[in-house]
Image (spheres, rainbow, N blue to C red):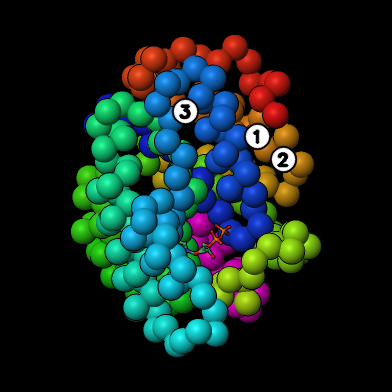
Amino acid sequence: MRGRFIVFEGPEGSGKSTQARRLADWLRGGIADVVLTREPGGTALGERIRALLLAHDAYAMLPEAEALLYAAARAQHVGEVVRPALERSAAVVCDRFVDSSIAYQAGGRGLPIEEIVAIQRLAIGDVRPDLRLLLDLPVVEGLRRRFAAGEEINRFDRAETAFHERVRSVYLRLAEAEPGAWVVLDAARPPDEVFRDVIAAIEERLPDLWSVVVAGARPATAGGME
Ligand code: TYD
């Protein structure tokens, strides 16, 4: 696979979606083929699974069923969107991927981590992120932002703080265990500052990005991409 796969991870209210969109816009300044996508979702089937997953109060869902639904959405997403894009040398920016399942379903829900890892293999095959950006911030700050923004509240937003603390600590442990695969950014800062660090991380960790993706030409500066 000749493209590059950049994944944003982080807890609720970390500003991932905004940063992912800004990065995709910035990359489009120099790269013809940039795909911005998200999980769960990114495909017609995936969006339907997303609606099932994020509906609250609609029905009971066991953690095992939840884990398999996330993996099902991911399998469709990888097969239909991510892999074809990487094969045609696109730059793919994705809001959440496998590590969300490890953080939420293993960390948050308490399912055995090796079982969660095992079901990912079927879903993703040999597709791996080239870089994972962890937007880290204290749990209370993330939840405060979420509620203040009046965003739609999903089942996870209603989980207890301890759940979100487990999610955060699993993310931090994953990043610590594999520092070459992750960049951890302090997401409690203003979005412009975080974005500058996102660009710096891309430049440092993926120096060959501009030569491997389609029509690679480095955007002139990291500034002015509001
Ligand atoms: P979303 O509203 O997109 O949350 P956010 O804006 O924080 O990304 O909903 C995605 C939710 O799904 C989020 O709470 C995290 C959760 N999730 C998992 O539990 N496991 C997964 O594998 C993925 C991709 C997401």
Question: Badge 3 is on which residue?
Answer: 205
**Residue 17 colored magenta?**
no
Question: Badge 1 is on which residue?
Answer: 195
Q: What whole-number distance in Å separates the C-alpha atoms at marks 2 and 1? A: 6 Å
Label 1 residue SS: helix
Left or right for 70, reference 13: left
Q: Nearer the viewer, residue 55 or 135?
A: 55
On the image, which quarter does residue 201 sit in? top right
What is the crowding at mark 3: few (fewer than 14 residues within 10 Å), some, or many (at least 20)? some
Check the picture and name the quadrant holding the C terminus.
top right
Question: Is disc 2 in contact with disc 1, using a CB cutoff of under 8 Å?
Answer: yes
Left or right for 142, reference 220: right
Q: Nearer the viewer, residue 41 or 121?
A: 41
What is the crowding at mark 2: few (fewer than 14 residues within 10 Å), some, or many (at least 20)? some
Q: Main structural element of the magenta stretch: helix, strand or loop?
A: helix
Q: How many numbered circles does the render carry?
A: 3
Q: Position of residue 154 (x, y in %)?
A: 58, 71
Marker disc for residue 14: none
Q: Is residue 163 above or below residue 73?
A: below
On the image, which quarter does residue 37 sit in? top left
Query: For the residue marked with disc 3, what is the amino acid?
Result: Arg
